[in-house]
Image (cartoon, helix red, strand yellow):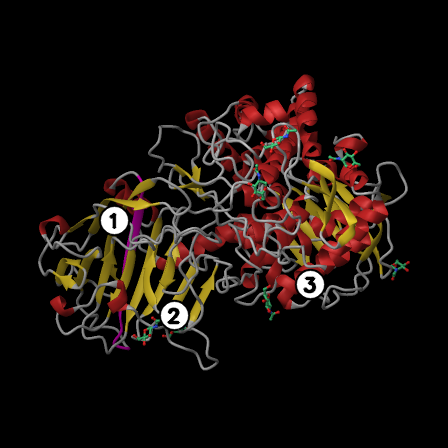
Amino acid sequence: MSAMKTCFAALLAAATACSATIDPLKHVNLFIGTVNGGNTFPGATIPHGMVKVGMDTDGDNFAGYDARPQFNVTGFSQLHQSGTGGAVPLSNFKLFPVPHCSAFEQCLTTITSRKTLRNILPDGTSDDFASPGYFSTNLSTGVRVELAATRRTGLHRYTFPSTSTMPRILLDITNDGQISAISPGLNINPKTGRMTGSSANFATSFGPGRYNAYTCVDFKGEGYEFTGPTEWGPYKINYPDKNGVDLSQHYYSYGSEHGGLLSFSQDTTSADGTTTILARVGISFVSTAQACSNAESEIGDWDFARVVSDSEDQWRDILSRVQVQTDGVDDETVTLLYSSLYRTHIVPGDYSGENTGWKSSEPYYDAFYCNWDTYRTLFPLMSLHDPENFARIVRGMIDIQKHEGWLPEAREAGNPQFIQGGSHGDPILAEFFVKYSDHASKLGVSAKDLYAALIADAEDQPGNWNLQGRQADIWKEKGYIPSDTTYPGGANTKQVSRALEYAFDDFAISQVAKVLGKTADAKKYVARAQNYRNSWNPNITVPDVSDVAGFMQPRFANGTWNYTDPRHCSVNDPLQATCFLNAIRRDGFYESSPIVYSQYVPQDTANLITMQGGNARFIERLNWIFDQNYFDSTDEPSQQIPFMYHYANAPGLSTQRSRQTISKWFNTSLTGLPGNDDSGAMGSYAFFYLAGMYPLPATRQFLLSSPYFPQISFFNPLYKSTTTIKSINFTGNPADGTGGNVFVKSVKVNGKPYKSNCYLEWDVFTAGATVELELTDDINVMCGSGKAALPPSISTGGYN
Ligand SMILES: *[C@@H]1O[C@H](CO)[C@@H](O)[C@H](O)[C@H]1NC(C)=O
Ligand SMILES: *[C@@H]1O[C@H](CO)[C@@H](O)[C@H](O)[C@H]1NC(C)=O
Ligand SMILES: *[C@@H]1O[C@H](CO)[C@@H](O)[C@H](O)[C@H]1NC(C)=O
Ligand SMILES: *[C@@H]1O[C@H](CO)[C@@H](O)[C@H](O)[C@H]1NC(C)=O
Ligand SMILES: *[C@@H]1O[C@H](CO)[C@@H](O)[C@H](O)[C@H]1NC(C)=O
Ligand SMILES: *[C@@H]1O[C@H](CO)[C@@H](O)[C@H](O)[C@H]1NC(C)=O
Ligand SMILES: *[C@@H]1O[C@H](CO)[C@@H](O)[C@H](O)[C@H]1NC(C)=O
């Protein structure tokens, strides 16, 4: 343990190589999930950076990039999200290299006419490369493009081939992915080539609201000097106007694609005839001047290698906190682990200094897509290794609540976006506070403000819960969300799934109240956390399946029940209904079936088991869910289902189901995600399964299984402690997740038998400990015999 610590200290201090540790940067594959709906972002960014510079193609990845070589490149833009749906977000301010045109005025500048394929490698894949903090590609025009980023600035490097007749670069100021720009402004300084984009106003991607964004682009020859552009001018659609300096002076009554184009002198000194030009792209949501000052202060030195190595250091610092021993583990698994951990740190983004809503010295974080996705596993993973960034995000959320009235739930560029269900800022704040209350003030988090923010969600009714807060009044009155009438506070949809989520949110608040010694509040909210019972109808069965009885169901205000077929929104739904934002108002469920939601009571699984007929029936039900394909690997409400056997004292079955889930749905290929990564929600989920754990947000417990590694350790930089989980007889991972010597027979912590084989307490991670697992190939292991052997539930005495 102490050798480990020293190793980490060396790594953290100087980023020097340390023989006992893995360099995680060698094991991150950024291309996982860039094809087939994962919508992941493979470009250059720092951890939680605002700027995410990346390549845009005309494929269907919402983060801009499609790995498949038949798709054409449309530009290299500066913002982006990762793993989101809606409309294509934040693909603003695209740069594009133009190596040949017969004359300035003849250059074709619209997206359609400039589209360019990438080089294709002999194996048929695209000639693209990415690692944390760096992206590169070779275009079929012979231009090489490399990208790097600081927090608010992108640095692009364009190497034009010797065959280029004249190097030119355009800046597209209207195509944000949606061509939504209104009133874009562009000015060109003909002496320096500086192009500034002013006050363009763009649409958000997952709800109402628009935002202004500004850019400031400077150019510099690398390896040669140029004093400025040789030609310049704004363009409208395919018409560059030579010698213009202000877009607004160049009127065409048609077209919606605008930007600026510059020509540069060639590098006549380079050995191979290539010409390399750097473009430094500052971004701001405040003003053009601030976009320029962001760029000047963050990349004053124009040193591409320095920018890359700085961001690599930041990534290495965070990702190295998890270390694994890899004897007997294939590279694919190591890469899956670190790539998943990497995607935990893309969003939310640190937009501090870029908030136009109010003045504050608190950190400002934006890009929440959405808390509904991330509260379950992403923030609990931050608890394990990154409390400082977690604290800053929490401070930013509290500051938003202070100024807007409610915690952010979904947010883009200062605009609240559509809420998917409950108010899940609550379990995120609670996750932080339940684990870090002792250090909250040291980390700048005010316990008083945090609690006030939670109470606002729980008690105050917003004008429209679709954007903020929750439908608090009817929830308080009924303890469920009735499905028959429209109540104030927003559209009356998703009544059942929302009620279950409100119950969990209230549980999270009760946990904070308990830490704060607010006994009466703790009691009140723990009672509200049991309102899930009000949506449980024990008499419902699935058509043609009589032995699985009892489901969460929609209920009218007068207490009688409506009926939603439990198969609704599942792969077996005879109506093939979807339950997305546009779902009909009466069905009651969001993005998952009533069958899945009927398992969603993480705060009180013990009572859920009672409602579902006891351990044996509960296990049969879980098996039935898997066997009939009701488990939905693509959506968060299913995430905990593979681990639920723990509560029925059958943890071996959880180990097997979670491993089968990984082997069936997660891998390192381009299509290696079952669906949208949801801002790292799926990445952090896969990480936990590989680490042999599953978190219970807003509690001090982690469910325990066996890691995919003989040893995995977590370094906590706040406690400066390392906790190592070791499998004393690790013999490898079964290929398809079935069987193997992977079932946890007994657990020791620091050499002493532990109270449970099924979960670990948070203090194991704060103090720094060695957890030893004895493994067996017998799936019929149990949690232990003591009274604390089963993981906690409200109805069996609650949480400590
Ligand atoms: C990409 O560009 C090439 C060459 O211009 C063109 O033939 C092809 O159809 C384009 N592909 C798409 C998907 O637009
Ligand atoms: C692009 O071409 C350069 C050589 O010009 C090569 O070093 C690089 O590996 C190629 N691929 C990428 C993705 O940069
Ligand atoms: C379920 O059926 C039983 C027996 O018919 C009845 O007593 C009970 O009220 C029903 N429960 C609900 C919630 O409808
Ligand atoms: C309860 O409300 C529903 C929906 O408004 C209505 O159809 C039903 O008749 C009511 N039942 C009683 C007993 O009032
Ligand atoms: C009851 O549920 C069905 C199916 O979702 C829906 O069509 C109907 O409108 C609901 N009835 C009422 C009164 O809300
Ligand atoms: C990787 O996972 C995806 C999505 O779950 C699946 O479609 C694909 O077949 C898997 N690929 C490999 C090589 O296992
Ligand atoms: C695991 O290792 C322990 C200690 O080396 C040994 O006693 C035990 O039999 C092993 N169990 C299995 C299932 O291999």
In the foreground, 123 or 595: 595
Which comes before the other along the chain, label 2 or label 1? Answer: 2
Per the image, label 2 sits on a secondary structure element best described as loop
Closer to the camera in the image, 566 or 134:
566
The first of marks 3 and 2 along the sequence is 2
Residue occupied by mark 3? 326
Q: Residue sitting at 57 percent across and 35 percent down?
A: 483
Q: Is residue 280 magenta?
A: yes
At x 66%, y 32%, the residue is: 560
Q: Which image quarter: residue 629?
A: bottom right
Q: Amino acid at mark 1?
A: Cys
Look at the image and give the residue range highlighted in magenta.
Answer: 272-285
Question: Magenta segment, principal secondary structure?
Answer: strand
Task: Give the number of marks.
Answer: 3
The numbered disc on residue 679 is: none
Residue 684 pos. (x, y %): 60, 51
573 in relation to 585, above or below: below
Residue annotated with mark 1:
216
Mark seen at residue 71? 2
What kind of residue is marked 3? Answer: Thr
Report, in whole angstroms, how far the alpha carbon at label 3 lies from the one at label 2.
37 Å
